[in-house]
Image: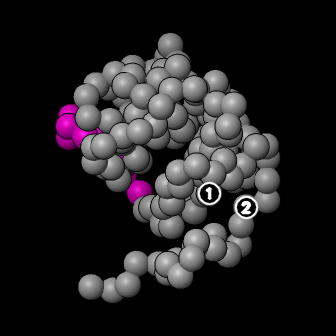
Amino acid sequence: FPSHDTVSDYAAIVDMRSAPGPSGAILLAVNPSRQLIFYSLNAPTSSLSYTIPLETWTHVAVSRDITGRTGLYIGGLETSTALDNSSKNQNGDVYIGRVYDDFHEGFNGYISNLRITKGVGRYTGSFSVPTSPFPSPGNLPTYLPPF
């Protein structure tokens, strides 16, 4: 994490860790200054010069290409990059809106259309934010049916 940020000073959006510290798993969070933080083994990066606006839907993406180049995007603008060649073969749980251990604050906001895709680096530079859902492979629906 950046030096002005402490590890305990964030709210998780997505946490794929099962223990504290860098384990190769992914943590996407927002700090009290409303800056995004993406943390993975060998790839701490943040949007220090970009602040997430309050009460506004904001498109956020993290994408890693085959070389390990990992980009953090806000509103289609690439805000930072890092190199991460660590394995992402995680067998644990995925926590949405909170950290795996409930020690940190939960994310205080709305999350819509969360997508985690394995094996596809969707973005390699700044892009126009999509206005329609990503197509789903095969015959799978692009939504969760009501219970």
57 inside magenta stretch: no
- Provide the residue span drawn in magenta: 99-109
Residue that badge 2 annotates = 129
Residue under circle 1? 59
What's the mark number on residue 32?
none
Quarter location, residue 8: top left
Can you say which quadrant of the picture contains the C terminus? bottom left
Left or right side of 27 for 146: left
Element marked by disc 2: loop
Can the viewer see residue 118 in this picture? yes
Q: Is residue 140 above or below residue 92?
A: below
Q: Quadrant of residue 109?
A: bottom left
Residue placed furthest toward the front: 138
Residues at marks 2 and 1 touching, judged by CB atoms closer than 8 Å: yes
Expressed as whole percent of the image width and height from the top left, the position of residue 131 reads 71, 72
Label 1 residue SS: loop
How many numbered dots are placed on residues in this image?
Answer: 2
* Residue drawn 53% across the image and 55% down it: 117
Q: Is residue 107 above or below residue 111?
A: above
Determine if residue 72 is in view: no
